[in-house]
Amino acid sequence: MSPEVTKRKIANMIAYLEELRAFAGVSFDDYVAHRRAVERLLTLLIQSAIDITSHLLADRAELRPDSYRDLFAAAADTGLLDRPQAQSLQLAAGLRNLLIHEYERIDDRQVWSFIPRAIKDFEAFLGAMKKVAE
């Protein structure tokens, strides 16, 4: 992935995050009325973080993690992310798998309650990636 593509993905993540902020603090009923939009925003944020991290990790260490969870652990191992960020993103990767593949019935309350954490986690991720991408 070229630096331009990485920068574009970061810009897209900023836009997705701004859209997600509109759902921070909404009631559960309001969330349910818009849950598919929230699920899509979360999926886009998580997948973008996966793409960026995978690319940057490949450039640094030539590691090929077996899963998205392992990808974020490797990012912490190489110093691309700090350990708490990586652990939070590992949880997000698990949520992404549920949303994409519907391995289990999606728990709307779990996704709704994840919104504030996602905002915090992806703000931190973007802060770390802006430094790396410069």
Image: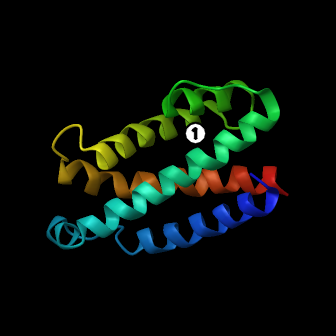
Give the residue pinned by disc 1.
Answer: 85
In this view of the protein, can residue 123 be seen by the observer? yes
Q: Position of residue 10 (x, y in %)?
A: 66, 62
Based on the displayed image, in which of its 4 quarters is residue 61 positioned? Answer: top right
- Residue visible at 81% across and 57% down in the picture: 3
- Residue visible at 51% across and 34% down in the picture: 68
Colour treatment of the image: rainbow
Up-down relation of residue 29 to residue 90 (above or below): below
From the viewer's side, name the closer residue of 69 and 124: 69
Up-down relation of residue 57 to residue 77 (above or below): below
Q: Secondary structure at mark 1?
A: helix
- Residue visible at 50% across and 28% down in the picture: 67
Category of crowding for the residue at label 1, using alpha-carbon neighbours closer than 10 angstroms: few (below 14), some (14–19), many (at least 20): some
Q: Position of residue 130 (x, y in %)?
A: 75, 57
In this view of the protein, can residue 25 be seen by the observer? no
Q: Position of residue 101 (x, y in %)?
A: 30, 43
Based on the displayed image, in which of its 4 quarters is residue 14 positioned? Answer: bottom right
> Tag count in the figure?
1
Quadrant containing the C terminus is bottom right
- Horizontal side of 130 relative to 91 (left or right) equals right
From the viewer's side, name the closer residue of 8 and 86: 8
- Horizontal side of 58 relative to 89 (left or right) equals right
- Horizontal side of 131 relative to 15 (left or right) equals right
- Residue visible at 42% across and 68% down in the picture: 20
Instruction: Indicate the amino acid at tag 1.
Output: Gln
From the viewer's side, name the closer residue of 78 and 116: 78
Q: Position of residue 126 (x, y in %)?
A: 65, 56
